[in-house]
Amino acid sequence: MDSEDLRLAVYQEFAATGRAPDAGSLAARFGTGVSEVADGLADLARARHLALDGDGQIVMAHPFSSVPLGFSVMGARTLWWGGCAWDSFALPHLLPGEAEVLVATRCPACGRPHAWNVGRDRPPDGDQVAHFLVPAARMWDDVVHTCGNQRLFCSAECVDDWLAANGLARGYVMDLGTLWRFAAHWYDGRLDRGYVRREPAQAAEYLRSVGLSGPFWGL
Ligand SMILES: [Zn+2]
Ligand SMILES: [Zn+2]
């Protein structure tokens, strides 16, 4: 079982159905045992292509998630958990058949519902803001916690209320346009064979190109 074949099988299942494949279906597909699949998934997790839970089940294959983290993303015929704000805004750019999706969430501070039609051509309208809690250098310490704290709020005031209520220090706040540009091409290539993660210098260049800067991003 080739590692890239396995990675693609996971990503393609998420893209087509909104769900992660289980080890049994992957084993059947590749004509191998469940333990070989488990080893392959663990290798992909070490390379940061996936995040697994304590039982080895697939939780995330960014920007896809098998668990709710505050966002739903509705396509023409498919419903995805959106991962974080960044991941949710990335989906129309990554999925060939989904030029525009409906991203929905609640403000973590006040519970107000928000929804946007998110497409490929321009950022959605709205004066809401995204807040990212965990600095870039520590995002993979616990990537599910990190994504769970990359949320969209009514306003900077709601961000401050939420931080105060939870005793947290401010991370990074960006407007919807910046979030959309950030999400637009970050995940390019993940549904294609031969995907290679960006080197740190390439990642830094991408972040700068979409207007992100400062120590939060390691820039
Ligand atoms: Zn709010
Ligand atoms: Zn995320």
Image (cartoon, helix red, strand yellow):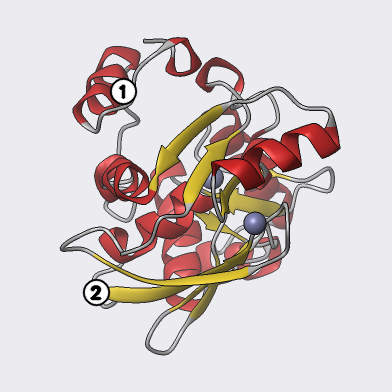
Instruction: Classify mark 2: helix, strand or loop.
Output: loop
Q: Residue at x 34, y 49 (%)?
A: 190
Q: Quadrant of the C terminus?
A: top left
Residue 145 horizontal/vertical position (percent): 72, 38
Residue 140 horizontal/vertical position (percent): 60, 26
Q: Earlier in the sequence, mark 2 or mark 1?
A: 2
Q: CA distance from mark 2 to mark 1?
A: 25 Å
Numbered marks: total: 2
- The amino acid type found where label 2 is placed reads Ala
Mark 1 crowd level (few <14, some 14–19, many ≥20, 10 Å Cα):
some
Residue picked out by circle 1: 203
Identify the image quadrant of residue 50. Answer: top right
Residue picked out by circle 2: 99
Residue 206 horizontal/vertical position (percent): 24, 27
Is residue 133 depicted above or below 218 in this figure?
A: below
- The amino acid type found where label 1 is placed reads Ala
Residue lying furthest bottom: 77
Is residue 19 depicted above or below 122 in this figure?
A: below
Image quarter where ligand 2 lies:
top right
Is residue 205 depicted above or below 180 in this figure?
A: above
Q: Nearer the viewer, residue 83 or 38?
A: 83
Instruction: Classify mark 1: helix, strand or loop.
Output: helix
Q: Residue at x 61, y 58 (%)?
A: 32
Residue lying furthest left: 121
Q: Nearer the viewer, residue 28 or 81?
A: 81
Q: Is residue 94 left or right of residue 107?
A: left
